Amino acid sequence: MTEAAYLPHPPSRRRLGPNGPAIGPVAWGMWRFAGATLDEATRLVEAALDAGVTLFDTADIYGVDGPGWGSAEALLGEVFAASPGLRDRLVLATKGGIVMGVPYDSSPAYLASAIDASLQRLGVERVDLWQVHRPDVLAHPQELARTLGNAVRSGKVGAVGVSNFTPGQIEALVHFLDVPLASSQPEFSALHLDPLEDGQFDQAMRHGLAVLAWSPLGGGRIARPETQREIALAAALDTVAEAHGVSRAVAAMSWIAAHPAHPIPIGGSQNPARIAELADVAKVRWTRTQWYAVLTAARGAPLP
């Protein structure tokens, strides 16, 4: 098949914000990272780096359902302390703004304290990307914009992003920000198409946002399909996976990355062998027909 038959290949590197660090086409998420031993944790970090992953995404709440609040960040901080030089090899992202029992607080005082607490647990003076984890509808976007701008100007944060914001919430925040918004992190997979359909991808392309797609395997349902729709989707993905000699999971993530917004799927496996597979995402090529076949199966209905 000729090169012209394929969709454009996702860039091997792109900037996180106008002047930010270079990031690859896949990221590694650390929501199940807490609870590992130091040796196990170090092997996982090294496996992701060996797979070409540059962006590592964590959050202050990760681990709250296991060892406790902040435990994923604290464990990563132990890895950095025990293996000097690892921190400089990755782009470090974390999130805050969720408060157990509240549930959200994006007030200036709380976010400033959350950033400081994350830095302390991670054992670093600066994170490359800090994201508001969930929108606090009681925070005026102008006030939030001022808080995020101050975080960047303080030097504690290299760039700012949002997670789980609607397109309208993003637009309002961008209006008031005096620093660039670098990223948005929505849930997106072939089984959760909202960002494709609600304008968020179009908005990201307009503003130059990096889209970080969480749960790219549909919460495991793509790997273990049960419904008729999920089985049809798995079959469409398998056609491409088998042609390229990769797993269905890799095909599913490459399908995400093939969209012109070039969303960055966040792989969440805590298995070194599966983390190594992230290197294969960039190898898969899609024709327009194949890509739309997956979308049609994902929708469970013909396209208009």
Image (cartoon, rainbow, N blue to C red):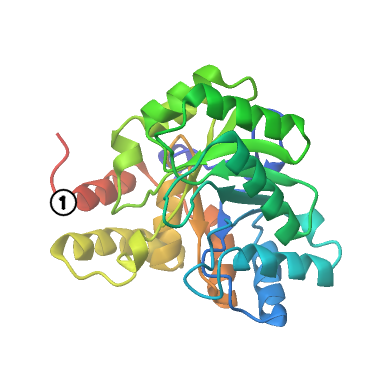
Quarter of the rendering occupied by the C terminus: top left
Which residue is found at the position 36% from the left and 52% from the top?
189
The answer to whether one can see residue 113 in this image is yes
Q: Nearer the viewer, residue 45 or 238?
A: 45
- Which amino acid is tagged 1? Gly
Q: Examine the rendered structure and indicate whether residue 262 appears above or below residue 188.
A: above
Q: Number of numbered discs present?
A: 1
In the rendered structure, the answer to whether residue 300 lies left or right of residue 145 reads left
Q: Nearer the viewer, residue 150 or 207?
A: 150
Q: Position of residue 69 (x, y in %)?
A: 56, 65
Judged from the image, the secondary structure of the residue bearing numbered disc 1 is loop
Label 1: how many residues lie within 10 Å, few (<14), some (14-19) or many (20+)?
some
Q: Position of residue 72 (x, y in %)?
A: 61, 66
Which quadrant of the figure has residue 182? top right
Q: Examine the rendered structure and indicate whether residue 63 appears above or below residue 54.
A: below
Q: Position of residue 83 (x, y in %)?
A: 83, 70
Which residue is found at the position 39% from the left and 49% from the top?
187
In the rendered structure, the answer to whether residue 179 lies left or right of residue 165 reads right
Q: Nearer the viewer, residue 200 or 222?
A: 200
Which residue is found at the position 24% from the left and 52% from the top?
298
The answer to whether one can see residue 16 in this image is no
Please name the residue that numbered disc 1 is placed on: 300
Q: Examine the rendered structure and indicate whether residue 248 appears above or below residue 255.
A: below
Which residue is the extreme one toward the right?
Answer: 84
